[in-house]
Image (cartoon, grey):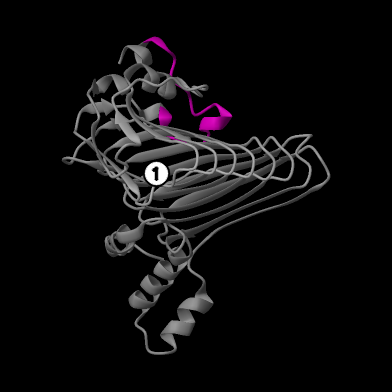
Amino acid sequence: MARLRDLPLPSADEEIWRYSRIDALDPTSFEVDADAVTVDGGEGFVSVGTRVEIAAEPDVFAEANSEHQHTVLIDVPRGEVVAEPIVITHRSSPGTATFPRTVVRVGENAEVTIIERFSSVDPGSALVCPVLSAEVSPAGRVNYLATNDLDVEAWQVGHQLISGDRDSSVRLSTVTLGGHYTRVRTEARSTGPGASTKQVALYFAGGDQMHDFRVIQDHDAPHTSSDLLFKGAVQDRARSVYTGLISIREHARGTAAYQTNRNLTLSAGAWAESVPNLDIRTNDVKCSHASTVGPIDDDQRFYLESRGVPPETAERLVVLGFFEEVLDQLPAGPHADELRSAVAAKLDLGGDRR
């Protein structure tokens, strides 16, 4: 862990780490290990183990990833369409620190779907610092889904760096159920006219878990669009943080950008923070942001109970329906039912309720 020993770790006093648990992390308690990764699909488009440098390293964790990277490179040439999803599976062992790096290069008018899964081999604390870097050429199309089912003692601090050129289409999806502290910082930049980005996320924390999302929708070209929908729930003593920024530069006229964050607090001791922000530097735009934090809607619960549904079942149905809007948009294919079952199982583990 030479890189993390030599460089100062961030502090929760910094705005970008506000509300986080970063002060509780001791990275020197982990031993660097090779990423246990398997890749299914994408024959001819995927290579594993080749070092690839990226343009930006936002913090010490991304720098450590650069030093210890174990890279999966997906390179889709111009005009190629990868018919089946490429599934990347990472499995972490207790006591280890791993640094997965997924680099995606999509040529002009090419298309690919990627499902990246993070899980634990055995129970216990581990540190996972993944980096996703995707460069999408004009009219390229990328569908990406990351799922986190790490052990409840594991730490994940990840970065997603996306660049979409003219008329490109990027769909970023996240399902986070695992981890003691899970943080993902996403910077999605539209660099060419007509580029569009869609982001959806489902996160569900219980026990003492904390899920932390920092998202930047960066519009660096005119007539671009972005749309974000993040939905989360916290129960027991769990915590969640969403901080989002729509950034529209002076020359990005004609842009449409939206962000929505909805959170359910299912227990008296649970806590969620939602901080949407706008930085708009031109008048010719359409933008909106919305966020909510609160318990299950009493009217929805009453509607079900008035039709003979028991209270606990009514609450379960409301929560599952709350998440369905995100689940319906995931490029999960055969994994969709598995994700629904995982959400339902987590709901069953909930402790004290309001």
Where residue 304 appears, as percent x and y from the top left, is 43, 83
Q: Is residue 346 visible?
A: no
Decide: few, some or many residues near mark 1? Use Cα within 10 Å; few <14, some 14-19, many ≥20.
Answer: many
Secondary structure beneath label 1: strand
Q: Residue at x 27, y 62 (%)?
A: 345
Magenta: main secondary structure equals: loop
99 and 209: which one is in front?
99
Asked if one can make out residue 125 in the rendered structure from this viewpoint, the answer is yes
Provide residue 275's location: percent of width, then percent of height. Answer: 60, 45
Q: Residue furthest bottom?
A: 307
> Depth check: 65 or 52 in front?
52
Q: Dividing the image into 4 quarters, which one contains the N terminus? A: top left
**Where residue 205 sits: x, y (%)?**
37, 51
Is 29 left or right of 191, judged from the image as shown? left
Magenta segment boundaries in residue numbering:
6-22
Q: Is residue 4 above or below residue 295?
A: above
- The reply to whether the magenta stretch includes residue 66 is no
Pinpoint residue 116: horizontal percent, then vertical percent.
34, 43
Residue 30 image-quadrant placement: top left
Residue visible at 81% across and 40% down in the picture: 282
- Residue beneath disc 1: 210
